[in-house]
Image (cartoon, grey):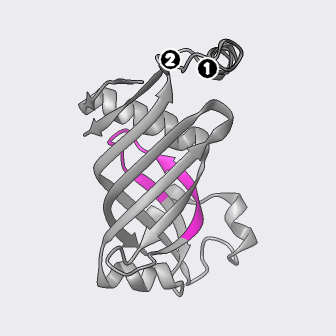
Amino acid sequence: MSTQNLSHLEAIKKIKELSEKAKICMFCTELETVPVNSRPMTLQETDDSGNLWFISSGTSNKNFEIKEDRRVQLFFMNNSDSQYLSVYGEASVYKDKATIEDKWSPLAKAWFDGKDDPNVTIIRVEPKETYYWDTKAGKLVSLFSFVASAITGNKTNNSDGVEGNATI
């Protein structure tokens, strides 16, 4: 596996690609508590600045935890394409109508009585440290590489993989 650290626009592009493809992450709060609190969350969007946006209930534990400590960790996994993303960042909670209107998804009706529900909030996570794992040539090439290694008995050098920091 080779290392390719990305910065600025390349980093934003990679964060956007991997997070939006995975769509669901484990959203962790209270990072100093063991075990950390985590729950699955659906990503609404990764914007052109690399910020990640989520819809959440104002009465949820995660919202209360973010009020106490804005630091969060997000783990995205797209196993079907062997792509992974870890995002450490700072979360902000928005309650204003304009942000709710902008980030609202009809799928959120499963949890809320529409976008005017007083419990609707929007969480923005601003990445501070990000690390990714990806394949250069895609999952099929990776699979052939692993199969060839298993057949020949030679260890794979995992040369089709790439990992690195994605710094905005």
Say which residue label 1 marks: 142
Please tell me whether mark 2 sits on a helix, a strand or a loop. Answer: loop
The answer to whether 89 is drawn above or below residue 113 in the figure is: above
Say which residue label 2 marks: 160
Residue plotted at (29% across, 78% down): 69
Question: Does any portion of residue 44 appear in the rendered image?
Answer: yes
Residue plotted at (60% across, 19% down): 138
| Magenta region, residue range | 39-53
Residue 101 percent across, percent down from the top left: 53, 61
Q: First in sequence, mark 2 or 1: give its number.
A: 1
Location of residue 65 by image quarter? bottom left
- Give amino acid for label 2: Asp
Q: CA distance from mark 2 to mark 1?
A: 6 Å
60 in magenta: no
Quadrant in which the C terminus appears: top left
Please tell me whether mark 1 sits on a helix, a strand or a loop. Answer: helix
Residue 27 percent across, percent down from the top left: 49, 65
Prevalent SS, magenta region: strand
Q: Could you tell me if the residues under marks 2 and 1 are in contact, i.e. CB atoms within 8 Å?
A: yes
Residue 124 percent across, percent down from the top left: 39, 61
Q: Nearer the viewer, residue 69 or 122?
A: 69
